[in-house]
Image: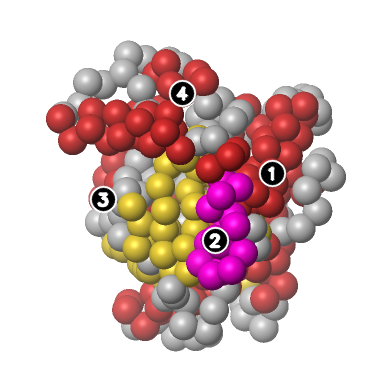
């Protein structure tokens, strides 16, 4: 997380970082949360408290200076608001990344910090009289696996968003509903639920091996040169292990945060693979989410409604 020198960026980047710092100095106080909560209890405008985190250092630098990042490693800082279907969500951010949440050799990796994070987020929710909390990335799965948090609201809304995105993708590229699906990371937190929802389809679950590497036993070799859609549900950079097995009729639908790297997109473009990315759910956000997530909010931050609109972007 701390590796590399921070990029200086332009004036807009500095204004964004200074704005986040100023907002937290002025408004990140329990007394103010309580006061807002008294109003929200009456008007029911704020529905959720969302905790985001940066998977890459570039994303962290888009929000805060390095010295600020060290102070919000496990304590949610105010980062913005978002509006979906007329309801408000409060976005907070921590500067920890995947490596802080999970370690294959230590099942209790940073457990005390994770417990404190959940407690603090729940406290903010209570003060604001909001309905729910939600967490980004792999955090919901990690917290549920360790028994730190038992509810998984992110699971259903993300699975529904992926299903709607796949339907939207097929309509755009002209693939039939009978097109086979490959769920890369299909035995993970979201993948298992998605596999259940797609049981009526020709679906192949490819489990990711610990420590990276290709799982040849579950890879559907017989689909080679046939129309198919691969839904990426893994972690960053895992796709690079498998993309040498891809073929031009295979279309990649990425649900993983962050989006595929420029090198990965170039490689896939060279072999003719179309790369699509789930931007998130259509909603207004202030400030806008950075890079490939601009224009929407993450699926895990949204609430599931009949008119929830999934945003899809082609990356090549």
Residue at position x 80%, y 42% from top? Answer: 148
Does the magenta run of residues contain 34?
Answer: yes
The residue under label 4 is: 69
Mark closer to the observer (4, 3): 4
Residue 11 pos. (x, y %): 15, 30
In front: 86, or 152? Answer: 86
- Real-space CA distance between mark 1 and mark 4, rounded to the nearest whole angstrom: 21 Å
- Color scheme of the displayed model: secondary structure
Mark closer to the observer (3, 1): 1
- Real-space CA distance between mark 2 and mark 4, rounded to the nearest whole angstrom: 31 Å
Does the magenta run of residues contain 201?
Answer: no
Task: Give residue 79's quadrant in the image.
Answer: top left
Q: Which badge, 1 or 2, is on the more N-terminal residue?
A: 2
Q: Which badge, 1 or 4, is on the more N-terminal residue?
A: 4
Callout 1: SS: helix
Callout 2: SS: helix
Residue 161 pos. (x, y %): 52, 70
- Real-space CA distance between mark 1 and mark 2, rounded to the nearest whole angstrom: 17 Å
Q: Which badge, 2 or 3, is on the more N-terminal residue?
A: 2
The residue under label 1 is: 123
Residue at position x 53%, y 43% from top? Answer: 32
């Amino acid at each position: 997380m701390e590796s590399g020198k921070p990029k200086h960026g332009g004036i807009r980047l500095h204004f964004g970082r200074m704005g986040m710092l100023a907002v937290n100095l002025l408004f990140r106080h329990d007394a103010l949360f309580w006061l807002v909560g008294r109003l929200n209890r009456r008007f029911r405008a704020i529905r959720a408290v969302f905790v985001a985190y940066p998977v890459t250092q570039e994303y962290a630098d888009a929000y805060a200076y390095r010295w600020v990042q060290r102070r919000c490693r496990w304590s949610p800082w105010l980062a913005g608001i978002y509006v979906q279907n007329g309801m408000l969500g409060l976005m907070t951010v921590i500067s920890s990344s995947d490596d802080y949440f999970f370690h294959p050799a230590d099942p209790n990796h940073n457990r005390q910090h994770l417990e404190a994070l959940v407690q603090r987020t729940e406290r903010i929710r209570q003060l604001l009289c909001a309905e729910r909390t939600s967490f980004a990335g792999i955090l919901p799965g990690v917290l549920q696996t360790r028994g730190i948090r038992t509810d998984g609201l992110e699971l259903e809304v993300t699975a529904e968003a992926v299903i709607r995105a796949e339907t939207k993708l097929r309509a755009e590229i002209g693939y039939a509903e009978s097109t086979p699906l490959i769920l890369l990371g299909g035995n993970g937190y979201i993948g298992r639920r998605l596999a259940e929802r797609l049981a009526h389809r020709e679906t192949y679950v490819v489990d990711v091996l610990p420590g990276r590497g290709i799982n040849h036993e579950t890879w559907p070799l017989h689909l080679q040169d046939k129309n198919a859609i691969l839904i990426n549900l893994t972690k960053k950079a895992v796709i690079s292990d498998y993309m040498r097995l891809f073929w031009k009729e295979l279309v990649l639908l990425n649900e993983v945060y962050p989006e595929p790297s420029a090198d990965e997109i170039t490689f896939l473009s060279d072999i003719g693979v179309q790369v699509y990315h789930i931007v998130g759910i259509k909603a207004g956000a202030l400030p806008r989410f950075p890079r490939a997530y601009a224009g929407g909010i993450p699926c895990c931050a949204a609430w599931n409604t009949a008119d929830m609109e999934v945003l899809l972007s082609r990356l090549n």
